[in-house]
C-alpha cells in the first residue's frame, strides 16, 4: 500500500533472519510465500525484512499486500460493513480472490501483471503494473493470505488483536479511526484469522520465535 508506515524493530529482524534461512534451504523455483496474522501483528514488516535479506543472496523478492484487494473502496468500506453487518461480511469474502489468483498465476509464469494498489494518503485505488519475469520470489502478506491457493510456504504470526491493542489505540500509523466499530471489526477478523492457523508451515510466536510445524 502506498504511503504505509513500517515499524521495524529487532524482533522482526530476528524472525526474518530465521525464516530467510529456512527459505534458502527449501527454495523452489518461482516460490510463493504467504504471511498471515491479525491486524498489527507485523506481517508487512516481516515481509519487508525477509525480502531485503533475500536480496542480499541475489534473490529478487517482491511483496504484495492483500489489503490492496478488498472488494469495497477504502472510503466506502466502513459504511458498507455497518450496513451489511460486521459479523456477516468481515472476513475472507471481502477479498478479490480471483484477482489475487490471477496475479499469483502471472508470477508463476513470469508475465506482466496489473495489480491494485491503495494510496493511503489519497485513499484512491491505483493500478500497478509489474514485470514478474524479473522477480525470483513472491511474498504475499495479509490477514487471510495463507488461504490463497498455489502457495509454497505459509507463515502465521500468533499475536492477537488484544495483544496489539496498545499499538492500535495509539494509532501510530494513522491507518484507522480507533472506535467501537473498529474494535468490532478487529474482533471478527480475529475469529477468521485464527481459523487459518492450522494451514501454517511456520509459526511466529508472540515472542517472535520461529517454529517449524510442517517440514
Image: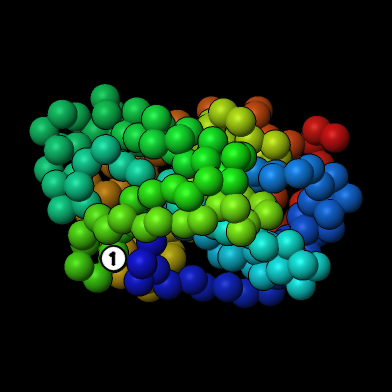
Apparent side of residue 5 relative to residue 107 in the rendered image (left or right): left
Question: What x and y, as percent, mark residue 146?
Answer: 57, 36
Question: Can residue 38 be seen?
Answer: no
Question: What x and y, as percent, mark residue 93?
Answer: 34, 28
Question: What x and y, as percent, mark residue 13?
Answer: 70, 70
Location of mark 1 (residue): 120
The residue located at (11%, 33%) in the rendering is 83
- For residue 88, above or below residue 189: above
The image quadrant of residue 86 is top left
- For residue 65, above or below residue 166: above
Question: What x and y, as percent, mark residue 120?
Answer: 28, 65
The N terminus lies in which quarter of the figure?
A: bottom left
- For residue 128, above or below residue 69: below
The image quadrant of residue 135 is bottom right
Q: Nearer the viewer, residue 20 or 98?
A: 98
Apparent side of residue 136 relative to residue 112 in the rendered image (left or right): right
- Colouring mode (rainbow / by chain / secondary structure / one colour): rainbow
Q: Nearer the viewer, residue 210 or 61?
A: 61
Amino acid at each position: 500500500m502506498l504511503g504505509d508506515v513500517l515499524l521495524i524493530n529487532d524482533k522482526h529482524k530476528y524472525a526474518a533472519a530465521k525464516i530467510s534461512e529456512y527459505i534458502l534451504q527449501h527454495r523452489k523455483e518461482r516460490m510463493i510465500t504467504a504471511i498471515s496474522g491479525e491486524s498489527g501483528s507485523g506481517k508487512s514488516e516481516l515481509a519487508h525484512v525477509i525480502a531485503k535479506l533475500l536480496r542480499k543472496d541475489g534473490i529478487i523478492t517482491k511483496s504484495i499486500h492483500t489489503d490492496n484487494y478488498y472488494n469495497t473502496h477504502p472510503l466506502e468500506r466502513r459504511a458498507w460493513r455497518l450496513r451489511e453487518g460486521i459479523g456477516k461480511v468481515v472476513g475472507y469474502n471481502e477479498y478479490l480472490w480471483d484477482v489475487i489468483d490471477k496475479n499469483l498465476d502471472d508470477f508463476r509464469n513470469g508475465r506482466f501483471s496489473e495489480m491494485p494498489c491503495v494510496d493511503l494518503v489519497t485513499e484512491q485505488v491505483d493500478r500497478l503494473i509489474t514485470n514478474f519475469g524479473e522477480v525470483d520470489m513472491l511474498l504475499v502478506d495479509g490477514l487471510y493470505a495463507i488461504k490463497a491457493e498455489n502457495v509454497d510456504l505459509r507463515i502465521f504470526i500468533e499475536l492477537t488483536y488484544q495483544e496489539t491493542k496498545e499499538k492500535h489505540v495509539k494509532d501510530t500509523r494513522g491507518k484507522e479511526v480507533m472506535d467501537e466499530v473498529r474494535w468490532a471489526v478487529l474482533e471478527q477478523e480475529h475469529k477468521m484469522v485464527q481459523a487459518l492457523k492450522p494451514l501454517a508451515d511456520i509459526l511466529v510466536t508472540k515472542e517472535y520465535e520461529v517454529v517449524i510445524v510442517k517440514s
